[in-house]
Image: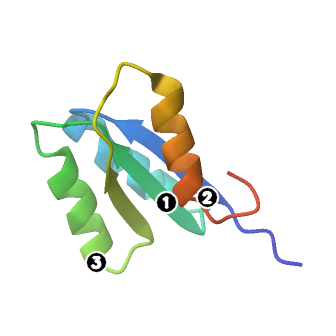
Amino acid sequence: MKIEITACVIVKNEAKNIGAWLACMAQFADEIVVVDTGSTDETTDIVRSFAAHGKRARLYAFPWTGDFSAAKNFALGKAHGNWI
């Protein structure tokens, strides 16, 4: 059985950091799930560009409700790996 790793992250206005995070996760994760909670900077553009270049990142929007666990559970629901 192959173990598949999913890297998940919840972001808002992380344009400064998301590129480096994506590049790092792409080295070992089979799947990357990015949940954006309402960025107003270039965060989502960076993720879309990364995915458009054949990388394994998927971007989802989740409106921030003030409940971190709701965003976390949403991200987990989008993950398919054995290890998340």
CA–CA distance in space, label 1 to label 2: 6 Å
Question: Taking 74 as reference, is 11 above or below it?
Answer: above
Residue under pointer 3: 53
Residue 19, x across and y down, in percent:
30, 50
Mark 1, Cα crowd under 10 Å, few <14 / some 14-19 / many 20+, is: many
Which residue is located at x 68 percent, y 64 percent? 81
Left or right of 54? Residue 82 is right
Q: Earlier in the sequence, mark 1 or mark 3?
A: 1
Verify CB contact (< 8 Å) between mark 1 and mark 2.
Answer: yes
Question: Taking 44 as reference, is 56 above or below it?
Answer: below
Residue 48, x across and y down, in percent:
23, 64
- Label 3 amino acid? His
Q: Earlier in the sequence, mark 1 or mark 2?
A: 2
Q: Residue furthest top?
A: 66
**Which disc is residue 32 wearing?**
1
Residue 22, x across and y down, in percent:
40, 54
Residue 2, x across and y down, in percent:
82, 76
Q: Element type at marker 3?
A: loop
- Label 2 amino acid? Thr
Residue under pointer 2: 6
